[in-house]
Amino acid sequence: MSTPKRWHVIASAAALLVVGTPAVVASAGPSDAETARHARAEWAGTWAAAVTRGNTVGLTNTGLNNQSIRMTVRTTVGGDRLRVRLSNLYGEQAVQVGHATVARPNTGTPDDRSDIDAATLRELTFGGSTSATMNKGAELLSDPLDFPVDEQEELVVTLHFPVLTGPVTFHGQSKVTNFIGASDLTTAADGAGFTIRPNCCWMFLSGLDVQRRHSPGAIVVLGDSIGDGNGSTVNAHKRWPDLLADRLVDARPEVRTPGVLNLSLAGNRLNHEGPEPGAGGFPGYPELGPNALARLNEDVFPQTGVKTLVTHLGINDIWMSGDSAENIIASLRQINQQAKARGLRSLAATLTPYEGHGNPGVWTPEKDATRQAVNTWLRGEGAAEFDGLLDFDAVLRDPAQPSRLLPAYDSGDHIHPNDAGNKAMADSVPLRLLGL
């Protein structure tokens, strides 16, 4: 996909505003009945993000130092309790987590989005402690917290890192505005202290699970910037996996609704590493992640309750790297085989058109012929290997010019769908292919 926007932040030289610290509510110990109820419940993934190494320059490379980051996520399914997953997978040192909280946003300040509802603020603990250390290359799971959440609900996670973290493990395109500020702001209801406000980035935060009475598992989307939401509206949750989750909630009773975990990664390729350069002067970045096969053991198989995998990858291998249809098909087949070996339902999606995108050499008739060859295989022999096919090419293409996006679905860069295009993709998914 097109180069993710690099962001630069300038911390204000002004002193941070002093804000009141609301009381953090602690939960009472569980009763015997509650303990028995929790024992019968199941953990389910409700939100997740693919993570990569910080880039070679900027804040994601230097890291956070006595700073807090406040991040918004949106659940896909609800439950009575939650737990948060943090990741230092790509870190170069152990990382200290000084304090962590979860809360609901203050909906009275929608334009700012940094304020939280103080009445809902809860501390996260790790082995009973409010602080913890993430070892180099390791993940950290919070203790279960009695905090009922609904499907399609925004939650705010705030983390404080008291000493320099070094290069962060992060997801480079959150499509929600997150916030960074000096010192421990984890309990600050007023977001005035958060002076750095990039329209990107979940840092160290990789997943959220909920405990439910029944769970049909989760659907994982392994994609690129089309799934990651390039071209969709910031703070609107209009990526096609978001909209598929909305559709599932509307279509199914709550206890039968699977979570939708969007592990898409802008710029990701099947057969190449993120820092590798591409056509049209594309420089490559670490945040584009490792090749997709290398992501399976980190981004797909460990997800809580994963039952179905949707793979939508390959277009970047064509436009960036000029890969052959044979190489792309070989990797798609390998992903499918590994998914099925793990007992997962495995679906594939056709590659969507992109004529008109980028500099000369990014799109060529030869590259489009490669895309069509991959799609022909997916609709033919590939359909017999996968458990189902999502024909996103047929949904998004312009019938008058099949190598281009339909103008009504084009975000303007001629490769990424707009909100309407994302909705068309979500609406086109046959629910029966998801096992529903």
Image (cartoon, rainbow, N blue to C red):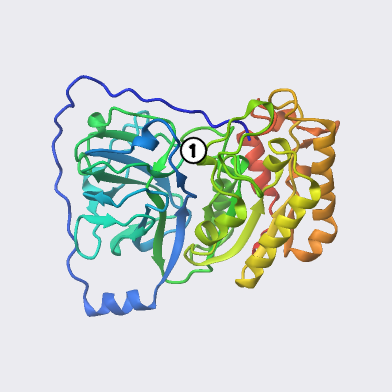
Q: Which residue is mark 1?
A: 173
Residue 144 in the image: above or below residue 122: below
Q: Is residue 428 left or right of residue 47?
A: right
How many C-alpha atoms fall within 10 Å of the one at disc 1: few (<14), some, or many (≥20)?
Answer: many
In percent of width and height, residue 188 lies at 20, 39
In percent of width and height, residue 181 lies at 26, 33
Residue 167 appears anywhere in the view: yes
In percent of width and height, residue 89 lies at 41, 53
Residue at the image point whose x is 74% and y is 63% from the top: 386
Residue 371 in the image: above or below residue 331: above
Residue at the image point whose x is 63% and y is 66% from the top: 339
164 and 214: which is toward the camera: 164
413 and 109: which is toward the camera: 413
**Amino acid type, residue under disc 1 in the picture:** Gln
Residue 435 appears anywhere in the view: no
Residue at the image point whose x is 58% and y is 48% from the top: 241
289 and 93: which is toward the camera: 93
Q: Is residue 283 left or right of residue 55?
A: right
In percent of width and height, residue 356 lies at 74, 25
Q: Is residue 101 left or right of residue 357?
A: left
Which residue occupies the extreme top position in the image? 13
Residue 49 in the image: above or below residue 321: below
Image quadrant assignment for residue 365: top right
What is the quadrant of the C terminus in the image? bottom right
Which SS class for mark 1? Answer: loop
What is the quadrant of the N terminus in the image? top right
Residue at the image point whose x is 70% and y is 38% from the top: 321
Q: Is residue 145 left or right of residue 426?
A: left
